[in-house]
Image (tube, rainbow, N blue to C red):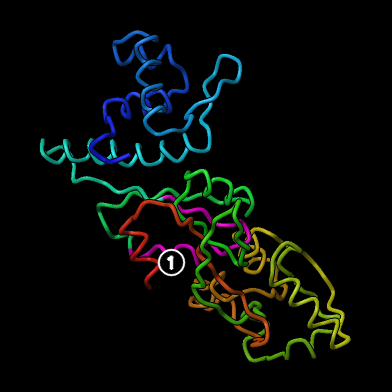
Amino acid sequence: MKLEQLNFHHLFYFWRVAKLGHLTQAAADLHTSQSALSAQIRQLEDRLGEALFMREGRRLVLTDVGQLVQSYAEHIFGLGQEMLGRLEGRSEGMTRLRVGSVATLSRNYQENWIRPVMADPSVVLTLESGLLEDLLTRLLHHQLDVVLANETVPADADRPLHCRFLGSQSISLVGPAKVWKRRRLRIPEDLDGVELVLPGPRNAVRAQFDALCASAGVSPRLKAEVDDMAMLRLIARDSGWLAVLPEVVVQDELRSGILVTVGQASQLQERFFAITTPRRHRIEALERLLAN
């Protein structure tokens, strides 16, 4: 099928039905009959050679191909709306960038990563966090443009993913300045019996830290384990305990002098990855971030 054979009127009707999920409401909004609307969507499916919807009871549910087509239609007609707005002087035109990040990733790291586009008035950011598998499902369904993670993921024929390495940083031991300002500890040698706050067991850093302590015969005293990096930051700041974490998590507290670095472990590294799908349409703002 060539581009000139694609009926954008049919594509527009499909887009409206996909957004509403119901023929009756879409037909009313478009001032046409349900039968006419169904016929035009069937013509689009015939042209594409793929089913776009399947029925679940009285609801229309997008197929995998339908989800892909919807993501492109959203971009096509979203740009059309922005174009009309700019021509009429109502807006500057916007690009929406949808970023997912795993719950165990530092929010400070995420903010630092998106900072280059935060000052761009043409970019609207949508930020989500959650479990990696849930985020990857949304990415594969074209509901996210990129997922930030602290672990790599395998790709296969059923999950075509691109995993780009963004960088890494050493893990630090931090504590309250009023107690630890002039003291240093070696990791892991000096941690036997020391009270610690650690990342939760789902965090890749935690597995590295536990293995390092086990190989050295060292047993710290666990006071808390925290999956969420925002909560880990608060615990590190307010508890008075020592915490093992990437310094980016508590960068503001380190700058202000509330916390100090008590030790570092170069053999412990948190790695950061940007995961995308190869079939995503090109988003200039995302390309800029991935190129940094």
Image: 229 above or below 207: above
**x and y percent of residue 178 in the render?**
63, 80
**x and y percent of residue 12 in the render?**
31, 28
**Image-quadrant location for residue 86:** top left
Question: Is residue 62 located in the magenta-colored stretch of the structure?
Answer: no
* Image: magenta residue range: 98-116
Q: Which residue is mark 1?
A: 113
Image: 251 above or below 180: above
**Image-quadrant location for residue 237:** bottom right
Question: Taking the image as drawn, is residue 263 in sight?
Answer: no
Q: Amino acid at mark 1?
A: Trp
Question: Taking the image as drawn, is residue 9 in sight?
Answer: yes
Query: Which of the pair 69/30 is nearer the observer?
Result: 69
| SS class, disc 1 | helix
Question: Is residue 103 located in the magenta-colored stretch of the structure?
Answer: yes
Number of disc labels:
1
